[in-house]
Amino acid sequence: MHDYYQDMNSRAKAGCPGGTPLEDQIFVVLLKAADSLAAEADQLIKANGLTSAQYNVLRILRGAGADGLPCNTIAERMISRDPDMTRLLDRMEKHELITRERQKEDRRVVKARITDSGLKLLKKMDAPIRELHKGQLAHMTSAHLKTLMDLLTEVGAHPKRSLRIQIPKISASESGK
């Protein structure tokens, strides 16, 4: 594990004054776990010629069915926000993984749909991705997996609470820079 995590963990265990609060430790452990799991998935996704963001878009559009989705809705459903959704979709359209069409009833709305090529690529990736995830969590019992799912779902259901907290801005002179 990263030195930062070890340092936090050792201070907390030793009961050091100013030890790292449990919430801080959990935050770091969650980030590290997500990064580790994602890195393995990224390798598999990259081997199939996609980025994680492109893979995410394809899965979202497959779930939407033949009707497709407005581009802004795709952006809202992304696991990780992409700062330039238009360019991401441009590249995917260039590779014929998706199509986009401006709507006649409201010209401001552009709908994206997955193509047959996009569907075939996802279908090819489904089993290897499923096996990867299964292997990543094989060391956990079914009961632990269920508990983990429940806890993470609860954490994810309340992301807006932290936005109510006033985070003070630190000037460069205060931070020692």
Image (tube, grey):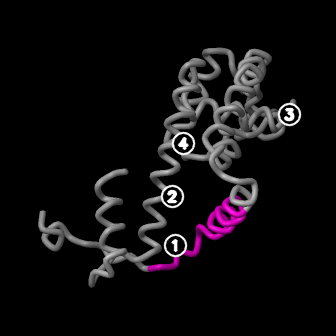
Of tags 4 and 1, the one toward the viewer is 4
Nearest to the observer: residue 110 or residue 161: 161
**Cα–Cα gap, marks 4 and 2:** 11 Å
> Range of the magenta residues?
147-165
- What secondary structure is marked by label 3? helix
**Amino acid on which disc 1 is placed:** Leu
Q: Which of marks 3 and 2 is in front?
A: 2
Kindly identify which residue carries mark 2: 30
The picture places residue 149, in percent across and down from the top left corner, at 70, 59
Residue at the location (68% across, 47% down)? 77
Instruction: Provide the residue designation for mark 4.
Output: 37
Q: What's the residue type where badge 2 is placed?
A: Leu
Distance of label 1 from label 2 (alpha carbons): 19 Å
The number of callouts visible is 4
From the image, which quarter does the C terminus lie in?
bottom left
Query: Between residues 130 and 112, which one lies in front from this camera angle?
Result: 130
**Does the magenta run of residues contain 158?**
yes
The answer to whether residue 88 is magenta is: no
Mark 2 is surrounded, within 10 Å at the Cα level, by few (under 14), some (14 to 19) or many (20 or more) other residues, namely few
Residue occupied by mark 1: 163
Crowding at label 3, few (<14), some or many (≥20) Cα neighbours within 10 Å?
few
The residue carrying mark 3 is: 65
> Could you tell which of marks 3 and 2 lies nearer the N-terminus?
2
